[in-house]
Image (tube, helix red, strand yellow):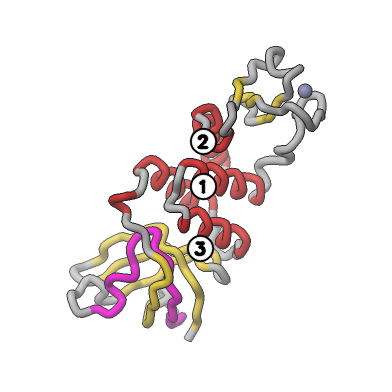
Amino acid sequence: MSRDIVTIIKSVNYSEADKVLTVFGRAKGKFTLFAKGIRKINSKNRGNMQTLSTSKVAFFEGKGMPLLTESELINTLDLENLNVENTKRILFMLNKFLQEGEAYPELFDSLQNALKKELTLEATNKVRLIFVKEMGFLNDFSNCSYCGKEDDIAYLDKNNFALLCENCYTKYGGKPLGGKPYESKVLTDALDYYIKRIVEEI
Ligand SMILES: [Zn+2]
């Protein structure tokens, strides 16, 4: 029997009582789990397998898809109370970025932090930046990308997803990130656009 801690990132009904779950495991990365009989009223795993919930699971790896045998809920989110757009942003990134057969334990931990903060815009954008950076799509995000300056880099070049300083921003059409950069519309829109572009390329 194999074990892992997983967050559900996609759930598809299969036949009358079963589900095929796509999960992000801390140890195993992205994989699919067959949850047999989970939609039955008396299934003991039933409440643990909602999208974006996290559980300790045991599963049997045979010839086909790994088969869920046990689950113990660690954290669940009330999807109805979450910001719909942020939920979509996170699920889009997880489903499109993670490659099967690769483990990303640090990214898994970053995701858990964002989930604990119930996917506020700040938490959503922070974890998206971490993913983009860790997956190699962002070289540097602490200096002005044109002159290398480390101070006053409060502007963003939306098209190239690059930070700009006070001196360079007018030259390259940078937009101000404002006093709360992680919650700014400029950063949110630029990340939406940049992540979509990455997904088209991978
Ligand atoms: Zn500069």
Image: 136 above or below 152: below
Asked where in the image residue 142 lies, by quadrant, the reply is top right
Question: Which SS class for mark 3?
Answer: strand
Q: CB of residue at label 1: within 8 Å of ligand 1?
A: no
Magenta stretch encompasses residue 60: yes
**Neighbour tally class for label 1: few under 14, some 14-19, many 20 plus, Cα within 10 Å:** many
Measured in 3D between alpha carbons, the distance from the residue under mark 2 to the one under mark 3, in whole angstroms, is: 29 Å
Which residue corresponds to the image point at 57% horizontal and 57% vertical from the top-left? 110
As rendered, which of 200 and 134 lies closer to the eye?
Answer: 134
Question: Which SS class for mark 2?
Answer: helix
- Which residue position holds label 3? 30
Ligand 1 position by quadrant: top right
Measured in 3D between alpha carbons, the distance from the residue under mark 1 to the one under mark 3, in whole angstroms, is: 22 Å
- Which residue position holds label 1? 123
Magenta extent: 43-61
Instruction: Give left or right: position of 102 versus 25.
Output: right
Percent x, y for residue 7?
A: 45, 64
